[in-house]
Image: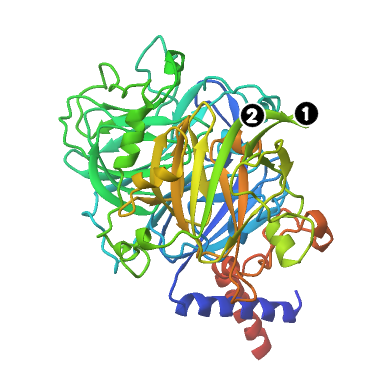
């Protein structure tokens, strides 16, 4: 190897080392291979998406302000993007991992995500965002811990447990994708998985034998923080633990007023963390249950059941599952959602306490009433719409088109209400104003619960009710301690209102989190430009993948780690080797 190359490698590594050693915020590194593996979560062998051979994927456990580097190798047979659900990526939507911000990672390629979990705490998750792949797995939990200087509004738990809930089909994600494209309903899930496992055999008539189930081991008398995420396709799930109270303490990065719940409705894309004290006797194990909500009795077979196992227990779980709240009355679930309040006296990841942000005193500058519709035929294809527009992803991602000033890729004309015109397919964006304070009302005309998520932000869920939203509905808003989160439910025949302060420049995805609605077009991007800064957000990363109209800029890449993709990763993985090579080189030169 030429001496110049060795010298270059060494000094690159040395610079990285100095950066990591003396910078205030640490780096953490992950090397992931995303591939198909064979699993049998419901007793039937099927193809699932694993990370490093595991399903679900690893938990990303970091601390606020840390820099996270994830090298993702795509060993699937189709393009891949990983999105970091709930992470705000301050001024860096390039790392968002959705079609509007990143070219997909081609099969056989890798790409390195590098972002800072800036000023965030709490419970989040990641998943593949393209081609219905989330239905096959590829998801995992994200924990962002507080720095020691920031107090937590509860005592340190004795353990931390992540629970991933997902409605699950034994059909492949390609088959499910085709069903959605052809306008067919997905039907009743074949089961509900808990951390990738099928149900405990609580009922011999509903659950066949031979299914491996999740066992969560605990110690009597101890208190655990249990983080629960609904990473499924489209099913709202009620979560509960037999004979145990769920003390809600946080949701999607916001500490909540601490309240006990017997169960919690967790809608698609939502995350909660509870403190659960193991205060029952250990004569038996206890059921952990996730049941579909607002469905008929034919869905009973899709109940997810895991086991809470005390270390000194004396027998298996027994008896009926803990009861489900009234299945036919969504008003219970709505009232429960309204009861979740922000703990405005608690500290947060940002320098100022949460209570210093008086969102109720800020003047709203823009209002969007966003109406969804069930799937309908547009130009011979089944599509879903928001305000009559079904989003069409361009071949060139929006961020690249913006940076390279390519005209005609998208339009800044998304309407603030439903227009009196036929539905259409288009690439229409919301042209938002930097530091605007906007009100968005989601009106659900579908027959099922829908959830909506905004990348790059947490928003205040200020109101929800049944019926049609009107100007008078604002009188019911909570403008004092509404919880700030990134994903909210909208019940059928109802509305939900949010307020959001647009202080994070970039192009951010606002989408239906229900996978079938999202896949058919229920999404829009919000463009936010800081007029005082020439480059309104971080420039495209050095390892950017180019596609569409910019395909000619793409360099060849092999299925190996690209050393130019991330200097931080190079610093960590090869520092010692390069140092040894350089010292040997120096020794030879001296001799």
- Label 2 neighbour load within 10 Å: few <14, some 14-19, many 20+: many
Q: Secondary structure at mark 1?
A: loop
Q: Residue furthest front?
A: 472
Give the residue drawn at x 79%, y 61%.
407
Answer whether residue 210 is visible to the viewer in this image: no
Cα gap from disc 2 to disc 1, whole angstroms: 12 Å
The residue that disc 1 covers is 380
Image: 312 above or below 154: above
Q: Earlier in the sequence, mark 2 or mark 1?
A: 2
Left or right relative to 455: residue 278: left
The chosen color scheme is rainbow
Where the C terminus falls, by quadrant?
Answer: bottom right
Give residue 375's mark: 2
Q: Residue furthest right?
A: 552
Percent position (x, y) of residue 500?
46, 56
Where the N terminus falls, by quadrant?
Answer: bottom right
Image: 124 above or below 528: above
Percent position (x, y) of residue 365?
50, 60
Image: 577 above or below 342: below
Answer whether residue 355 is visible to the viewer in this image: yes
Give the residue drawn at x 26%, y 22%.
316
Q: Secondary structure at mark 2?
A: strand
Percent position (x, y) of residue 128?
59, 44
Q: Quadrant of residue 529?
A: bottom right
Q: Quadrant of residue 446?
A: top right
Image: 80 above or below 517: below
Percent position (x, y) of residue 222?
19, 43
Give the residue drawn at x 67%, y 30%.
174
Give residue 523's mark: none
Of residues 76 and 398, the one nearer the viewer is 398
Of residues 378 and 476, the one nearer the viewer is 476
């Amino acid at each position: 190897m030429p001496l110049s190359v060795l010298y270059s490698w060494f000094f690159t590594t040395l610079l990285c080392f100095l950066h990591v050693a003396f910078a205030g915020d640490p780096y953490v590194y992950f090397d992931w291979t995303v591939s198909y593996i064979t699993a049998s979560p419901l007793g039937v062998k099927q193809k699932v998406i694993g990370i490093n051979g595991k399903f679900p994927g690893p938990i990303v456990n970091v601390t606020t302000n840390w820099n996270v580097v994830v090298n993702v190798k795509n060993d699937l047979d189709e393009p891949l993007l990983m999105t970091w659900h709930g992470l705000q990526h301050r001024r860096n939507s390039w790392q968002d991992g959705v079609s509007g911000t990143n070219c997909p990672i081609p099969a056989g390629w890798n790409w390195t995500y590098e972002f800072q979990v800036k000023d965030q705490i709490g419970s989040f998750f990641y998943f593949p965002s393209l081609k219905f792949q989330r239905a096959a797995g590829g998801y995992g939990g994200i924990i962002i811990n507080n720095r020691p200087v920031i107090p937590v509004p509860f005592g340190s738990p004795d353990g931390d447990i992540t629970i991933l809930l997902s409605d699950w089909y034994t059909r492949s994600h390609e088959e499910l994708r085709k069903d959605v494209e052809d306008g067919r309903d997905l039907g009743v899930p074949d089961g509900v998985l808990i951390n990738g496992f099928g149900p405990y055999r609580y009922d011999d008539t509903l659950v066949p034998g031979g299914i491996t189930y999740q066992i969560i081991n605990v110690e009597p008398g101890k208190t655990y923080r249990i983080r629960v995420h609904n990473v499924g396709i489209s099913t709202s799930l009620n979560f509960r633990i037999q004979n145990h109270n769920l003390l809600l303490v946080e949701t999607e990065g916001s500490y909540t007023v601490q309240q006990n719940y017997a169960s919690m409705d967790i809608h698609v894309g939502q995350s909660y963390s509870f403190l659960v004290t193991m205060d029952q006797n250990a004569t038996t194990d206890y059921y952990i249950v996730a049941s579909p909500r607002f469905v008929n009795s034919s869905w009973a077979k899709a109940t997810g059941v895991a086991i809470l196992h005390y270390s000194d227990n004396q027998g298996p779980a027994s008896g009926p599952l803990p009861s489900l709240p009234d299945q036919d009355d969504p008003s219970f679930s709505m009232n429960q959602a309204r009861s979740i309040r922000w703990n405005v006296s608690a500290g947060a990841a940002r320098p100022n306490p949460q209570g210093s942000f008086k969102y109720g005193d800020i003047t709203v500058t823009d209002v969007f009433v966003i109406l969804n519709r069930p799937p309908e035929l547009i130009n011979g294809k089944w599509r879903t719409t928001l305000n009559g527009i079904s989003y069409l992803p361009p071949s060139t991602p929006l961020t690249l088109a913006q940076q390279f000033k390519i005209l005609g890729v998208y339009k800044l004309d998304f309407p603030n209400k439903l227009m009196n015109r036929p539905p259409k397919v288009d690439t229409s964006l919301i042209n938002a104003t930097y530091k605007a304070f906007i009100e968005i009302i989601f009106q659900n005309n579908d027959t099922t619960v829908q959830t909506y998520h905004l990348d790059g932000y947490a928003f205040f869920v200020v109101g929800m009710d049944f019926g049609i939203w009107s100007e008078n509905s604002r009188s019911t808003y909570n403008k004092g301690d509404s919880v700030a989160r990134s994903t909210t439910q909208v019940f059928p025949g109802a509305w939900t209102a949010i307020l959001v302060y647009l202080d994070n420049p970039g192009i951010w995805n606002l989408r239906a989190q229900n996978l079938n609605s999202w896949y058919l077009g229920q999404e829009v991007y919000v463009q936010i430009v800081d007029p005082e800064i020439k480059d309104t957000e971080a420039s495209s990363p050095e390892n950017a993948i180019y596609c569409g109209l910019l395909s000619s800029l793409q360099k060849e890449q092999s299925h190996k780690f690209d050393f130019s993709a991330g200097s931080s990763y190079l610093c960590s993985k090869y520092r010692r080797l390069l140092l040894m090579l350089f010292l040997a080189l120096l020794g030879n030169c001296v001799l």
